[in-house]
Image: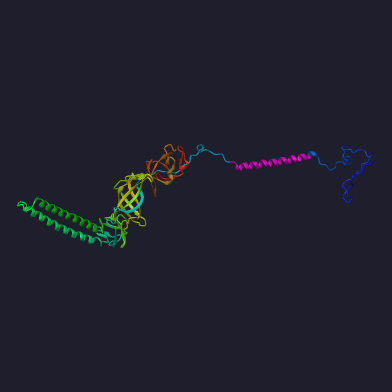
Amino acid sequence: MGTNPEHLPDADAPQKEAVTWIGRDRPAFDRGVEPQAAHSPDLGRPDEGSTRRTWLIRGVALAVVLAVAIALWISHHSKPALTALADKTQAPLISVMTPALKSVTSNVTFSGGIAARYDMPIGNDGDTGRVIAVYVEAGDHVRRGQILAKLDDSVLIPQVNRLAASLEQARAQAELSQAEYKRALGVAAAGALSAEDIEKRRATAVTDAANVKVAAAQLAESEARLKRTRISAPIDGVVLTRKAEAGQIANPGGEALFRVASGGEVEMRGQLAEQDLAQVKVGDAATVYLTGLPRAFPGRVRLLGAIIDPATRLGEIRIALTPDPALRPGAFARGSVTIGNAQRPVVPQTAVLADTAGSYVFIVNSQGNAERRAVRVADTGDNGIVIGSGLTGTERVVTTAGGFLRDGEPVQIASGGALGESH
């Protein structure tokens, strides 16, 4: 019985290999022998040793390329070895100078404003009244007792006249009572009047005399109230401000109608730092500058504050000034007080350094090493920094690049400059 295939290949499809029909009588297929290998020689197959050598050469070349690339990358990205400053064989080259002692004027500066030395407010100290006249303007010079303004006195004048008449009436009655008492005393010896009548006349005379005093006091009070309707200057001076206007109601204890500077004297009032206040004395010469004016105004320290403000650490200072039309109270001013004239070393600004320990400079000592020297800065000017303490003026001070030096480090001074000048 033969074995038939379940399906046949498509007749139109291309035939790539022969189809073998396996029948009952066909010998079994030998799976270990390839048909073509058994009948045809291997003519085009390459040698296995040659192929291995080719791949080995290619692998070695690729490894060499990778090694070169890695070496180049490391050479470009690796950091150079750092050499410590102490391990360098060559000392740093620096520039130095010997600061000469110079005459330095020490000043302290502050700001403030111009004010009247004695600024006196003048208002209504009488009864409430309406202003009916104003006789001065701001800036006028006034004399003591000069009337500045006048209040309505239409009610007070009749009162004064009535009280004056009452006083005259009381005086007349007192004189009459006194005369009657004297007559009673004259006839008392003859017994014409009893002792009781004489005593009554004496009492009447005393009462009428007291009424005269009462009337006189009432008249004086009314005259004083009338006088207070005339607002006058209590001192000689200059009117600083005028707020009184005709028709205005002036109340006692209200806003000042005028402000007068006593004698026209002005001063500068400022705030001075706590550390500077200790160096200033009353009587020291001072100079005051106003904004927008090129000229200076000389003066002297008149008063120093007795306390220091704990919030601002500032104290008050007052500079007495000569009266001048340009010195208007309220103007902003800047003051300067000369506190001393001494010989101080002056160094360039680049020579002074600072850190948490304070200000310092580097000098070159006798062994040729950089040495840190703590200093106190007294002032800063156009010529450099004035050293208050720490230098004598004979040291060799490093002018630049001091921030790159270390204390005790050997240094080399650049040649080509004269001693006492910056190289």
Range covered by the magenta-colored residues: 50-78
Nearest the eye: 99 or 283: 283
Asked where in the image residue 347 lies, by quadrant, the reply is top left
Magenta span: predominant SS is helix
Residue 56 part of the magenta segment: yes
**Residue 272 drawn at (x, y percent):** 35, 47
- Magenta span includes 390: no
Answer left or right for 263 relative to 384: left
- Which sits in the foreground, 289 or 258? 258
Indicate left or right for 71 with 132 as reference. right
Q: Position of residue 205 (x, y in %)?
A: 13, 54
Can residue 101 be seen from the camera position used here?
Answer: no
Residue 60 image-quadrant placement: top right
Q: Quadrant of the N terminus?
A: top right
**Which residue appears at 16% of the width and 57% of the height?**
170
User: Is residue 52 in view?
Assistant: yes
Residue extending farthest to the left is 190
**Residue 84's x, y, as percent?**
52, 38
